[in-house]
Amino acid sequence: MLLAIDARLHYALDRPAELLLAIEVAQTPDQRLVQDLLTTWGTGPLVPIEAEDGIGQRTWTSADDRFEVQYTATVEVSRAAPDLLALDTDPLPLLPPTVVRYLWPSRYCESDRFESWVNRRFGGLQGGALVAALDAYVGETMRYVPGASNGTTTAADSFIQREGVCRDYAHLLIALVRAAGIPARIVGAYGLGVDPPDFHAVVEVWLSGGWHLIDATRLAPVEGIVRVGVGRDATDVAFLSIFGSAQFVGQSVSVRRLDG
Amino acid sequence: MLLAIDARLHYALDRPAELLLAIEVAQTPDQRLVQDLLTTWGTGPLVPIEAEDGIGQRTWTSADDRFEVQYTATVEVSRAAPDLLALDTDPLPLLPPTVVRYLWPSRYCESDRFESWVNRRFGGLQGGALVAALDAYVGETMRYVPGASNGTTTAADSFIQREGVCRDYAHLLIALVRAAGIPARIVGAYGLGVDPPDFHAVVEVWLSGGWHLIDATRLAPVEGIVRVGVGRDATDVAFLSIFGSAQFVGQSVSVRRLDG
Amino acid sequence: MLLAIDARLHYALDRPAELLLAIEVAQTPDQRLVQDLLTTWGTGPLVPIEAEDGIGQRTWTSADDRFEVQYTATVEVSRAAPDLLALDTDPLPLLPPTVVRYLWPSRYCESDRFESWVNRRFGGLQGGALVAALDAYVGETMRYVPGASNGTTTAADSFIQREGVCRDYAHLLIALVRAAGIPARIVGAYGLGVDPPDFHAVVEVWLSGGWHLIDATRLAPVEGIVRVGVGRDATDVAFLSIFGSAQFVGQSVSVRRLDG
Amino acid sequence: MLLAIDARLHYALDRPAELLLAIEVAQTPDQRLVQDLLTTWGTGPLVPIEAEDGIGQRTWTSADDRFEVQYTATVEVSRAAPDLLALDTDPLPLLPPTVVRYLWPSRYCESDRFESWVNRRFGGLQGGALVAALDAYVGETMRYVPGASNGTTTAADSFIQREGVCRDYAHLLIALVRAAGIPARIVGAYGLGVDPPDFHAVVEVWLSGGWHLIDATRLAPVEGIVRVGVGRDATDVAFLSIFGSAQFVGQSVSVRRLDG
């Protein structure tokens, strides 16, 4: 699937600040970046750095009183939905060292609090079948309600409130998968069909020796998801970190299909 | 049902402390206190005071280095299980003023966090039928596991961990009932059949102009529950509050049936 | 001091809802209500009920699609600032039964978490001198910043963030005072000089056999505070509780001095 | 300084489980591992893997019903205390990509909640002088009390309770340093002079292009600290992770000086 991405951010600053952007599309085997362009107004020099797990990049910049950025990209995505039932759990000692950290609880994914219940309720399942059951559980339990959560909402909160946005779906699925002893990480992304249009967040689980992509919200088709970066939870994939004080002026995100 | 209660507490103190006991059986229309006796060793004078909502009493005392108490009571309980399906919600403006506070969230019963979900999932029900459904939900969801929770566990925690003891069952049911806009309070109690033997905690809900008793754990029969006191949550019905520093030495609680 | 109060609330409702108002001035020995008037538009009948501890009243009403209320009052306040250093702690067993509950932690005032530190840092003080030191500590520690907190902020949160509004000052002072074993309650109030104008919240501590008023924010003079109601924390003195769903349209609060 | 380390762990298992050990000394420029030996009883094969940031290693193993391990090492430590006042903050865009993650809040170090207060109170300082002031603040504020905290205690909790162990000191200092926009990570360690003897936890801050070691507890001299591994907080440096259910039988840690 060939996709055109257009994202714009606009902030006003009280005083000079440094900023870290994480909005650029990652080059990975299943998503080929045809072309992209990052344009900024009112900013200092752009300094790109490698992001978590060597996937994608972030870009440092600075601004005095206003910060405006436009990012456009064309991406070719070739990816099949994972056949979860055909995938299996890897023996823990065979996990790559950099995957081990995705077994642990993290700030927004308190997997340790869910262990007892997950093992009791889903104890008869394992591997991909277990992940599929947890994913189905999240889909049945949660309701997509923009505005129902905020930047401090955790998986435990979402499990109680049972409504939220892509970030909350991702956190809850990650927490449940880790509670079952299977590595899971968040993916900051663009998603075709996300409505209202916004940055997207999905999940990757480690099964049968590789990472497999799951959109717990079902909003985007599997080939309509474009990775920006990965991490333990939303902490690691914030699309903009401001080291200072800023006011939001505007934002738009657009993902369009170019072929078919 | 005629019940014999025997409770003993034993603590060692580092330095003189004041203590507030809430272990004496309340005299209420459905439980007649035939006789009771509070005996203490190593304590100063006993000062009884009225407890929350005028139900039961607490007793102040003090101790220097050790604190030991035995309480024995004989109680006649005459009470039928509430027919929840025949009970209805009172219009809010007709609630007695002292009942209104049991609509609010409290420290261990964060009912506001459950409102959205309760109204969505149980929205088709009301009054006693709604309470019965929430009670059934708690019974199906929770598993009775002594040691799985502690004194800081809240209803939200229990909703995630899905195991705990009577206190946790009570807190979760109270939180769900209040989330539905129906008053609910905790009852510190003795319960026949609680195993391992311990102080018990149950729930009262306000329907059709009165309080109705529910044991969310199902451990004790309806006539096997003996009220000590009531309140918003465990904060108000702690069987012992120590204003100072003490070490637990021992405790026993026994509830036996004398008739039948 | 003679004060004129004018408070207005305006909400739009999605569907019929019941509402509980707590905005009317309480009649107490140190504040004489000269006259007041509660006017509503778009509401059903008004049903006043007694509020917590028999101080002041709340009023139930209902509305279909909009809710608008104006409350005006003239109040004569005669009150001296408490001479805290001359006041002492009452022996716990001599506390009136209805005061005991103000020793416990509550949802927004987690006094148990502060006990160890309060006793260590302020352990050489007691009675009114201890309360005065805790009050001074709150004043030095906190900064008044409207918008820095929200309705879920607790005393523990404020102790970390160290900024907030009257509600946060009150919660923190209450938590510290209770941690020292002294009863403290919140007072929902009107306050002369609160800027930006809003409902106010202050503290009462129990010393030498009575409740004594303290404005931890120092925004209002002691005779410029007019009690509406009391309770354990903000839960009990919310000026408006809506049993349903509503949008805020507007609000204004004005307190003016008529004499002098 | 030449140090001899001896650590032993003993657990009983209910059923076969996988285990991840993080107790082996890391080989780094300032600590030369002369020799070490990991001996286990009742376990399956040992599978070492690289740990976070390529510092040190963890070892996977498995056990059926009991798990016992002894680790002995001889280490030569050559390290000077950092002269914090001579160190400066690096411009954010010049941070190595793998250091950026140590700017973010993490589960046990909620640095975002401290930002406002840290910037207000310590705003006149920067770089190493700021870190030194934060370190002094933690030392003055906290009291070392074994048993006062547990495995779920966070920096925010410790800031309120103001007592705890090395883990809590480290979390609080990390949270404050990150709140000031300076990278900080936890170091799982052995420490000479830790009393009662136990595993130790210290802090590294990123200043002037490198990591600098700080023991917020002051329990161990700078050459008496031996790194095991690093990470965002205690989550990443747990000395033992059990994927299953186990009972603690016993543990001992000994660090002795061999020279001088």
Image (cartoon, coloured by chain):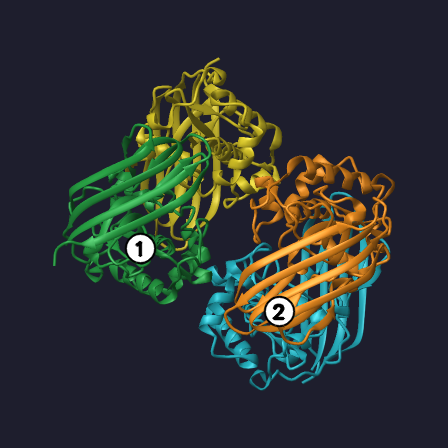
Chain colours: A green, B cyan, C orange, D yellow
The outermost residue toward the bottom is B86
User: Could you tell me if the residues under marks 2 and 1 are in contact, i.e. CB atoms within 8 Å?
Assistant: no
Residue pictured at 44% horizontal, 19% vertical? D88
Image coordinates of residue C39 in percent, x first then y, are 69, 68
Q: In this view, does D175 lie above or below D28?
A: below
What residue appears at the point 83 percent right and 44 percent down from the top-left corner? C81
C253 relative position to D250: left or right: right
Across and down, in percent, residue D57 comes to 32, 33
Give SS at disc 2: strand
The spot of residue D68 in percent (x, y) is 40, 42
Question: How many neighbours does mark 2 have within 10 angstroms: few (below 14), some (14-19), or many (20 or more)?
Answer: many
Q: Which of C250 and D28 is in front in this view?
A: C250
Please name the residue shown 64% across and 38% down the image. Answer: C142
Res A57 quadrant in image: top left
Q: Could you tell me if residue D56 is visible in this image?
A: no
Residue at numbered disc 1: A197
- Where residue C11 sits, quadrant-wise, is bottom right
Q: In which quarter of the image is residue D43?
A: top left
| Relative horizontal placement of residue A175, taking residue B6 as reference (left or right) | left
Residue D3 visible in rendering: yes
Q: Looking at numbered disc 1 in the image, what kind of residue is underneath it? A: Pro
Towards the viewer: C69 or A232? C69
Mark 2 to mark 1: distance in Å? 36 Å
Image quarter (top left, top right, bottom left or bottom right) of the C terminus of chain A: bottom left
C258 and C10: which is toward the camera: C258
> Mark 2 sits on what residue?
C19
For the residue marked with disc 2, what is the amino acid? Leu
At x 61%, y 32%, the residue is D141
Subunit bearing disc 1: A
* Disc 1 secondary structure class: loop
